Image (cartoon, rainbow, N blue to C red):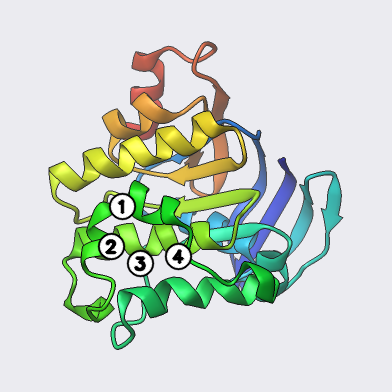
Amino acid sequence: MLKIENLTLHYGHSQILHGVDLTAATGQVTCVMGTNGVGKTSLIRAISGRHPRSGGTVTLDGEALGVLPTHVLARKGVASVPQGREIFPLLSVRENLETGFSCLPKSDHAVPDEMFELFPVLREMQHRRGGDLSGGQQQQLAIARALITRPKLLLLDEPTEGIQPNIIQQIGEVIGHLRDEGRMAIVLVEQYFEFAYRLADRFTVLRRGEVILKGTRQEIEKPRLLQAVSV
C-alpha cells in the first residue's frame, strides 16, 4: 500500500530526515520506533502532508504522489491521528466525527455503527463537548474520526502517550482488529515497547533521522530490537 524511498525533510536549514525508506502493507502494522527527537513525528508529518518533504518518493496504492497538501492526501486515503490528538474541544463528539465527512461523497455522510462498536464510550458521550472528555477518551475519538474517512493508510503517532492502562488495552485491541480486517495499512509510531512489539508485523527503527534497523518480526529478534530502540 505504501512505499517510501530516500525520503528527506528539512525544517529551515536543519535536515531532520536522511534518506528514509519504509514499506507498509495492507493488513499489517508497520511500527516506527526510536528515542525522543529522532524524527518519528516528522516522518508522519511528511507522509500525511503536514510538512512538505524535501526529497524522495512516496507511492500509495501504486500511485506516485507528489508533494501534496494534507487535504488532498486525505481524499486519496491517508488518515492521520496526530500526537496530542487535536480534536476540536468546543465541538461535540458527534460533530468531531462528522468533520471526517469532508473526505467523503454526500451519500456517505453518516457515522457508521462500527465506530460505536469499536469505541462504546463515544456512543454514550456523543453529545458532550470533545474538550470535556478524558485524554484516553479523546484519543479514541481521534482514532474514530480518522476511520470515518475510510482510509487506505492509517497513521498513528504515539497513541498510548498519557493514556491510562485500560484504554491502552482497548486501543491495542482496535488496532489489532483493523489490521486483521485487511482493509488498510497501518503505520504506528510508538515508544511503549511491549505495546508496539505485540502489534507490529514490521519494524523501522530511526536514530538521528536515519533508519538503523528494519525488517519483519521474524527477521528481527526481540533483544536486538530492544537494544536498537534504547540507544
Q: Residue at x 53, y 44 (%)?
A: 187
Q: Is residue 219 above or below residue 12?
A: above
Q: Amino acid at mark 3?
A: Arg
Can residue 86 be seen at all in this image of the molecule?
A: yes
Q: Are marks 1 and 2 in contact (CB under 8 Å)?
A: yes
Counting residues from the N terminus, which is met first, the one under dot 1 or under dot 3?
3
How far apart, in angstroms, are the residues tagged by discs 4 and 2? 11 Å
- The residue beneath circle 1 is 119
Q: Secondary structure at mark 2?
A: helix
How far apart, in angstroms, are the residues tagged by discs 1 and 3? 16 Å
- The residue beneath circle 3 is 85
Can residue 42 be seen at all in this image of the molecule?
A: no
- The residue beneath circle 4 is 145
Q: Secondary structure at mark 3?
A: loop
Q: Secondary structure at mark 1?
A: loop
Q: Residue at x 37, y 43 (%)?
A: 190
Q: Is residue 180 left or right of residue 104?
A: left
Q: Nearer the viewer, mark 4 or mark 3?
A: 4
Other residues around mark 3 within 10 Å, as few (<14) / some (14–19) / many (≥20): many
Q: Nearer the viewer, mark 4 or mark 2?
A: 2
Q: Amino acid at mark 2?
A: Leu
Q: Which mark is residue 159?
A: none
Q: Quadrant of the N terminus?
A: top right
Q: Amino acid at mark 1?
A: Phe
- The residue beneath circle 2 is 122
